[in-house]
Amino acid sequence: MTAPRPAAPPARPLPPGPRRRTWAAGLAALLLSGAAHAAGTPATAPTAPTCPADWRDLDPLDLRAAQVSVPRLTFTDARGTDQRATAPRGALLLQGPATGGRRCSYFVPTSGMPDRVTRGFVLDTQVRAVPPTTDLTGTWVRDANTGLTLTRTDGGPWTLTGSLTAALPDGSVGSANLNGPLRPDGGHWTYRDGRCEAQLHVVGQWVVAADNGRCAAPDVTFGGLYHHVR
């Protein structure tokens, strides 16, 4: 004989009378409030890229050199709004990665550093890329007190020597030297000596150096943009 199935539990009744109306009204208000919130919440607009005042804030691996190919170039912001800075045809620029067909760019004067003022975004159609130089042998200068020399004998490995003199915060003068082999390291060159490590990136007709801050006194670095002088 089959045992009888237990009866289903009784359904929970809605609150009677005025309490039922209050409960239903509260539920409806909650649902409407949630829908209104979902519909009325604006989407967060993407942040427009910026062109930092210090070009060294960009990743050296993303840098390239370019030359202005239009009669006069006007730098813009990331959205294309004209800025005051301009550059003439033939001017050399240090550029970051492409963003929507534009690149953060810095005018580089002859034997000078990338300009903090003459900078902004530039369309790729307004410039031509400058390929990395293959003429690396010789002396490269960042400023009057900092230089690097690259040498190579009979097709062998490259050797880096460098010297730096800088004023220190306490008023004294600090100096540092580099001397050792350069090794290819995925698109750039790496120098290591004890705690010091430096990378050299060939960018157009320049060499861009970066180090780990342990090649000289604190707050003194070999990092920067170097021009080929001989």
Image (cartoon, helix red, strand yellow):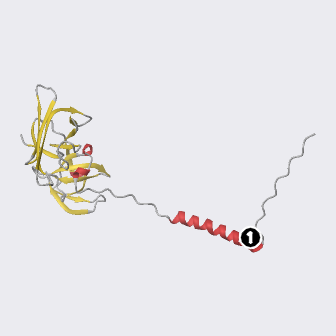
Instruction: Name the residue tied to disc 1.
Output: 20
Categorize mark 1 by other alpha carbons within 10 Å: few (<14), some (14-19), many (20+).
few
Please state the total of marks drawn on the protein image: 1
For residue 122, which quarter of the picture? bottom left
For residue 212, which quarter of the picture? top left
Q: Residue at x 24, y 62 (%)?
A: 82
Residue 176 image offset from top left, x and y in percent: 13, 42
Determine if residue 163 is in view: yes
Question: What SS does tag 1 mark?
Answer: helix
Determine if residue 68 is in view: no
Residue 57 image offset from top left, x and y in percent: 25, 51
Q: Is residue 131 above or below residue 44?
A: above
Q: Is residue 33 above or below residue 152?
A: below
Residue 32 image offset from top left, x and y in percent: 60, 67
Q: Is residue 43 above or below residue 174?
A: below
| Amino acid type, callout 1 | Arg
Which residue extends farthest left?
Answer: 230
Which residue extends farthest bottom?
Answer: 18
Residue 103 image offset from top left, x and y in percent: 26, 52
The C terminus sits in image quarter: top left
Q: Residue at x 74, y 74 (%)?
A: 18
For residue 33, which quarter of the picture? bottom right
The N terminus sits in image quarter: top right
